[in-house]
Image (cartoon, rainbow, N blue to C red):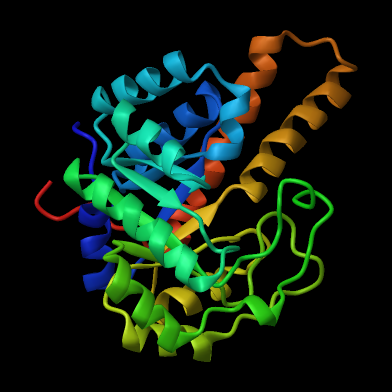
Amino acid sequence: MPLISLKELLKEAVENRYAVGGFDAGEHGFAEAIIQAAEETKAPVILMVPEVFLKLVAVDSFFPYLINRIRSSSAHVDLHLDHGTCYESCLQAIHYGFTSVMIDGSLLPYEENVALTKKVVEAAHAAGVSVEAELGHVGGSEETIMEGSVADERFFTEPEEAADFVKKTGVDALAVSIGTVHGVYRGTPKLDLERLSAIRSRVDIPLVMHGGSGLTDQDFKNVIQCGINKINYFTAISHTAVEAIKEKLQSTEGKVFYPDLITIALRKAKEAVVKQIEIFGTRPRSGF
């Protein structure tokens, strides 16, 4: 199946009020779990490679593997660079055949974020590639992802600014900050659904929520109802796979072959992706 652009993939999500999951893969196993989940459910997915994970892989072999694996699959998949921090990273992903990129200038001053995003949009659109950007800032980082963090209202997305940002940049999807964090959430998340609805009323492109771990099934249904069309989800899936490994090691006192260990972990990861696809209400693409 040919790769699909983010813009094309999310079009039906906007029209029919569901969300498509964006699931991270930093190695072959998680990529396989995500693709198999999409094949099993016949639902589209966004397979994301975070820029921060690139230090873990040989890009020259991993990227072509992803492209070829997706093309040989029956699933509808958008291959997405997640949290690209610079123009060069986005160009690299475009060069290898990614169908969407995220440029994250959310920590930059507003006008600098606009300028960087616009520059990436111009290059990406010339190659038929979609672009996601972030306005406001979703908390959490590689350093705090395991011990957890909380949302800071000072960095929540302003609805009027969101409308201006979309107009000035021509971006295809916008990640907004409404009360989630990357990684583990300390305490109970309090989502600003009123703010999200206000953004949705002013912005006509797909909206993205980062930091899905820690939310309840009802939280996901609420944000989708208020206008979220793409949900990034990784930490809880990673925890599920790790717990499966720990349980197997304990039950066998460590007397287990490595392939068996990884098979168990990736089966649990696939099951977790399938579960989120169902929660997000993702539907098979019409006409396919």
In this rendering, would 120 be left or right of 232?
Answer: left
Depicted 105 relative to depicted 3: above or below: below
Count of marks placed on residues: 0
Q: Is residue 208 visible?
A: no
Q: What residue lies at 84% left-to-right and 10% top-to-bottom?
A: 255
Depicted 187 relative to depicted 272: above or below: below
**Residue nearest the observer in this picture, 51 or 87:** 87
Q: What residue lies at 68% left-to-right and 64% top-to-bottom?
A: 139
Q: Looking at the rendering, in which quadrant would you find the N terminus?
A: top left
Depicted 252 relative to depicted 146: above or below: above
Q: Is residue 60 visible?
A: yes
State the image coordinates of residue 136 (x, y, percent, origin top left). 55, 72
State the image coordinates of residue 92 (x, y, percent, origin top left). 39, 31
State the image coordinates of residue 45 (x, y, percent, origin top left). 36, 46
Q: What residue lies at 21% left-to-right and 63% top-to-bottom?
A: 12
In this rendering, would 82 be left or right of 118?
Answer: right
**Residue nearest the observer in this picture, 270 or 88:** 88
In this rendering, would 42 be left or right of 218?
Answer: left
Q: What residue lies at 28% left-to-right and 40% top-to-bottom?
A: 99
Residue 163 location, quadrant: bottom left
Residue 52 location, quadrant: top right
State the image coordinates of residue 232 (x, y, percent, origin top left). 51, 55
**Residue nearest the observer in this picture, 236 or 144:** 144
**Residue nearest the observer in this picture, 162 or 140:** 162
